[in-house]
Image (cartoon, rainbow, N blue to C red):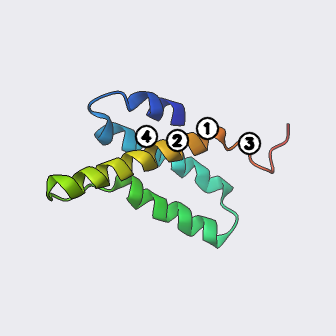
Amino acid sequence: MALLVLAAMQSPFCPAYAAIALLWATTLLSVEVRRPRDAVLLIALWPAILLVPPTMAHGPQAVLSIAHTALTIGVCVWLVLRGPPAHAVP
């Protein structure tokens, strides 16, 4: 799923569609949550993924857009590289 989001980021319509797919991918992580701290971090990640920048001057909006893109790419790369869960049997 994360690889599909990374591939979809090449599209000019990416923010509208890739954010929902990335939210879905992070929702699948909820089965691996074992501590309350991890649950809070996962729930705090969702608004950051779905963050829609308000209408503002181009400078701050550009910075917010770059931060959102970096977060999207970072979460996707983390999902791909994190490996199997510790309780998985090979």
Q: Are marks 3 and 4 in contact (CB under 8 Å)?
A: no
Separation (CA) of disc 2 from disc 3: 15 Å
Does residue 5 lie above or below 74 as drawn?
above
Q: Amino acid at mark 4?
A: Ala
Would you identify the image quadrant in which residue 64 lies?
Answer: bottom left
For the point 62% across and 71% down, the residue is 37
Does residue 12 lie above or below 67 as drawn?
above
Q: How far from the left and from the top, in percent, is residue 82?
A: 67, 44
Residue at the disc numbered 1 = 80
Query: How dense is the environment of label 2, judged by Cα within 10 Å: few (below 14), some, or many (20 and up)?
Result: many
Q: Are marks 2 and 1 in contact (CB under 8 Å)?
A: yes
For the point 40% across and 58% down, the residue is 48
Residue at the disc numbered 3 = 84
Relative depth, front residue between 38 and 69? 69
Q: Residue furthest front?
A: 59
Query: How dense is the environment of label 3, judged by Cα within 10 Å: few (below 14), some, or many (20 and up)?
Result: few
Residue at the disc numbered 4 = 21
- SS label for mark 1: helix
Residue at the disc numbered 2 = 76
Q: Amino acid at mark 3?
A: Pro
Separation (CA) of disc 1 from disc 4: 14 Å
